[in-house]
Amino acid sequence: MPKVEGLSGKQRRFVEEYLLDLNAAGAARRAGYSPRNACNIGSQLLKKENVLKAIIEAQQRRSKRVELDQDYVLSGLKTNAERAAQAEPVTNSEGEVIGEYRYEGAVVNRALELLGKHLGLFVDRVQHEGPVLDLALLTDEEVAELRRLLAKAKREPLSDVA
């Protein structure tokens, strides 16, 4: 990676690691930052103008190098959708058409879904239900307990819930 002005060695390493999986916390850990604070550090690094500039420049160089861009991806999805939607004859081992046709609906649907997401046709919505907590009704002790729990949650990584 070319040297970007104003980046420390760890920040350059963070940029390199971030490009692998676009995971800021993982990149921060792999770059040598504190594993305990990796989530916060990764988030903070992504807000730094020079780090963000380095990431964008590196992504652009990579896209150019591998000739991969939005047009390529969208074109591939379109081609897959069109090819999978065609009724294709099924042949036996000798190459003779046996009178059956294959249609790959799951492939078509997935390609169209990805294209639709790109075009903003599908918006993920989350509906929140349940009682609304009026914080003004909490006692001082309850507020103190909430603060304690929030502080504890910030110090400890979230565990996977089965």
Image: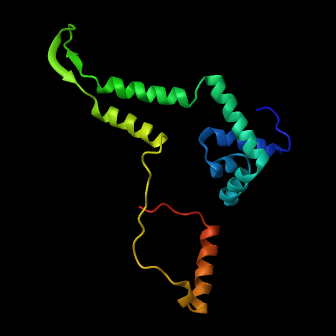
Q: Quadrant of residue 67?
A: top right
From this viewpoint, which residue is outermost toward the right?
6
**Closer to the camera, 31 or 99?**
99
Percent of width and height locating residue 149: 59, 77
Which corner quadrant holds the C terminus? bottom left
Residue 115, picture quadrant: top left
Residue shown at 67% from the left, 41% from the top:
17
Taking 3 as reference, is 160 above or below it?
A: below
- Image quadrant where residue 108 sits: top left
Q: Is residue 7 left or right of residue 80?
A: right
| Residue 71 to residue 142: above or below | above
> Between 41 and 81, which is closer to the camera in this rendering?
81
Q: In the rendered view, would you say 44 is above or below 22?
A: below
- Residue 19 vs residue 38, the one in the foreground: 19
Q: Is residue 151 left or right of residue 133?
A: right
Q: Residue at x 68, y 55 (%)?
A: 43
Residue pictured at 49% horizontal, 81% vertical: 133
Q: Quadrant of the N terminus?
A: top right
Q: Is residue 35 left or right of residue 103?
A: right
Q: Residue at x 47, y 26 (%)?
A: 75
